[in-house]
Image: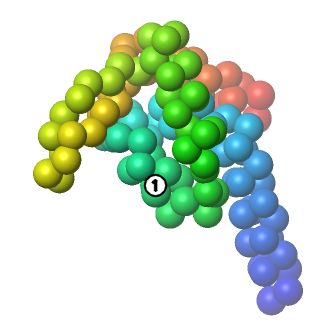
Amino acid sequence: MEDINLNEAFTKIMERRFVKSFLDLFILKLIESEPMWGYKILKKTEDLHQIKLRHGALYPLLNALEANGFIKSKQELQKGRMRKVYRITPKGTHLLKTSQNFLKQQL
């Protein structure tokens, strides 16, 4: 029983380390699943991986991903409010596939 709890604990630790190390790819993967605005990305990250991102960390990353052509944004009315909604671009999809292939090769 103790081994199971220890394995679960180590799995959670590794998951959090991985997400933090590859946050840009994780965000691309989230946006690939559905277009999202910043707050929704924050909540999904917390819900899925118990990682609380600060606005000060997320928005510069989103701006960099957009500046490099991996995502694009558009102001849209969502849930009764104007939001900046992010979508993955073909270049972002290619980056995700390339990184997934690389990780498979390494593992």
Q: Nearer the viewer, residue 17 or 1?
A: 17
Q: Where 87 sits versus 2, above or below?
A: above
Task: Locate the C terminus by quadrant.
Answer: top right
Q: Nearer the viewer, residue 100 or 31?
A: 31
Q: Nearer the viewer, residue 35 or 67?
A: 67
Q: On the picture, is 9 further left or further right than 24?
A: right
Picture residue at 51% right of the left edge, 10% below the top: 68
Q: Where 38 sits versus 25, above or below?
A: below
Q: On the picture, is 11 further left or further right than 101?
A: right
Label total for image: 1
Picture residue at 17% right of the left edge, 53% below the top: 79
Q: Where 5 sits versus 72, above or below?
A: below
Picture residue at 37% right of the left edge, 24% below the top: 88
x and y, in percent, of residue 106 in the image: 77, 28
Task: Locate the N terminus by quadrant.
Answer: bottom right
Decide: few, some or many residues near mark 1? Use Cα within 10 Å; few <14, some 14-19, many ≥20.
some
The quadrant holding residue 50 is bottom right
**Residue 25 in sight in this render:** no
The colour scheme used here is rainbow
x and y, in percent, of residue 36 in the image: 34, 40
Q: Nearer the viewer, residue 71 or 1?
A: 71
**Residue 79 in sight in this render:** yes
Picture residue at 49% right of the left edge, 51% below the top: 42
The residue that mark 1 highlights is: 44
x and y, in percent, of residue 96 in the image: 52, 24
Task: Kindly identify the amino acid type of the residue bearing the numbered disc 1.
Answer: Lys
Q: On the picture, is 2 further left or further right than 44?
A: right
